[in-house]
Image (cartoon, rainbow, N blue to C red):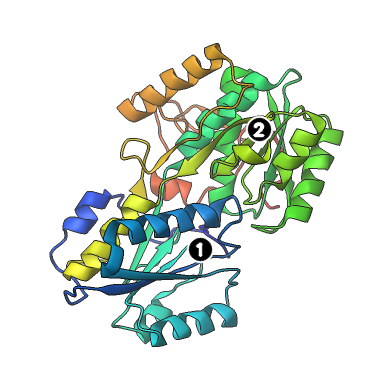
Amino acid sequence: MKKRTSVLGAVLVAVTVTALVAATAGTAAKQATIKAAWIYVAPHNDGGWSQAHDNGRLYVQKALGSQVKTTFKENIANGPQLEQTVASLVRDGNKIIFGTSFGFFSKKLAAKYPNVLFEQATGTDQAKNLSEYFGAAEDTIYLSGMAAGAASKTGVIGYVVPFAIPEVIRHANAFALGAQATHPGAKIKLIWTNAWFDPTKEKKAAESLKSAGADVLGQNVDSPAAGQYAESVGVPWVGYDNNASKFAPKSWLTAAVYNWGPYYLSRVKAAMAGTWKSGFYYGSIKDGFTSLAPYGPGVTASTKALIAKKKAALVAGSFYEFAGPLWDQSGKLRVAKGKKLSVTDLYAMNWLVKGVIGSPKG
């Protein structure tokens, strides 16, 4: 399953990319040039998740020039296809491989190729030659939710979601809490597509949400199909994981986006220097891993000011969206006042906050 997390089996320690790169006990021998590969679950130019990762690959290529040879494989599914893809990349001499979907790599797979370094986005497994990386997109998704809430007149917002797993659930919750911050009492209606990238399903979900009364649309899926529909019917739209404003220039509000390039560059450099070491990276707004895309014409100056203030509080650590009190859909207190959810808690989240309409089971 893609880029996503189920249950975290062991306590994860969030470390900075600097700490990871500075590690001196490496598993790769120092070399002057290197072959590095990326595996995508969707097309490299999907306008969303995979394109953001490919931008990171290009960042590495530009920074290192002739010192690195990069390649990518797209539209790869878990299972036999993934295993065949990895085998092919290893035969071609790739020394570090980035899997941009949850479940792509496992300890068993990494053990099969002990001289290759594996990096997996959003997963939990770690081994001597297997590392994990992701970040606090929930923070910038909360901020994008604020833009959605401010743009809504009815307080009914539609949210297109892929799979009912902890990553998507925490993102939906963050979006809802952000929307409720600027539009108290807002309701967030979910439609599950059960696909990370399926433009047809995403458009149908957007149509259904508008028919159900949503006057703003958001998403946690990968294509811009919902936004293109929103543009056609004059509904504001919040994207996800890439600046997709060109697909809906009038409807576009903003989106939580990722800057994968610096992390990728640091890890490839470490592999080249022989200082690569397995770890768990959880990036943040503060270190530049996640941010907001430029605003569209529908975001007012007052809304921008509110978001800027909240962003500053997130960076300073004086605000955290998953601090109590927080209630779930049934009214059960899930996070008591004075308590905060940890990264471990977020990687196991299986409940939806008050005001979200839809099942956390998909």
Which is nearer the eye, 337 or 216? 216
**Residue found farthest to the top:** 302
Mark 1 lies on a secondary structure that is loop
Q: Residue at x 57, y 42 (%)?
A: 240
Question: Tag 2 or tag 1, which sits nearer the N-term?
Answer: 1
In percent of width and height, residue 37 lies at 41, 71
In depth, the one of 59 and 210 nearer the eye is 59
Q: Can you tell which quarter of the image residue 153 is in?
A: top right
- Three-letter amino acid code at the position of disc 1: Phe
Nearer the camera: disc 1 or disc 2: 2
The correct choice, above or below, for 128 with respect to 346 in the image is below
Secondary element under disc 2, as helix, strand or loop, is loop
Residue 312 drawn at (x, y percent): 37, 23
Vertical order, 345 against 25 (above or below): above
Q: What residue type is labelled 2?
A: Pro
Please indicate, yes or no, whether residue 188 appears anywhere in the rendered image: yes
Quarter of the rendering occupied by the N terminus = bottom right
Q: Disc 2 designates what residue?
A: 249
Please state if 151 lies on the left or on the right of 117 as rendered: right
Q: Which residue carries the number 1 mark?
A: 102
The percent coordinates of residue 227 (x first, y second) are 70, 40
Q: Could you tell me which residue is drawn at 65 percent across and 51 percent down?
A: 223
Residue 90, disc: none
Q: How crowded is mark 2: few (under 14 residues within 10 Å), some or many (20 or more)?
A: some
How many numbered discs, if any?
2
The percent position of residue 172, horizontal first and vertical second, equals 60, 40
- Examine the rendered structure and indicate whether residue 221 appears above or below residue 269: above
Q: Distance between the residues labelled 1 and 2?
A: 31 Å
Residue sitting at the far left: 24
Give the residue displayed 52% in from the left and 84% down from the top. Answer: 84
Where 250 sits versus 350, above or below? above
Label 1 neighbourhood size at 10 Å, few (<14), some (14-19), many (20+)? many
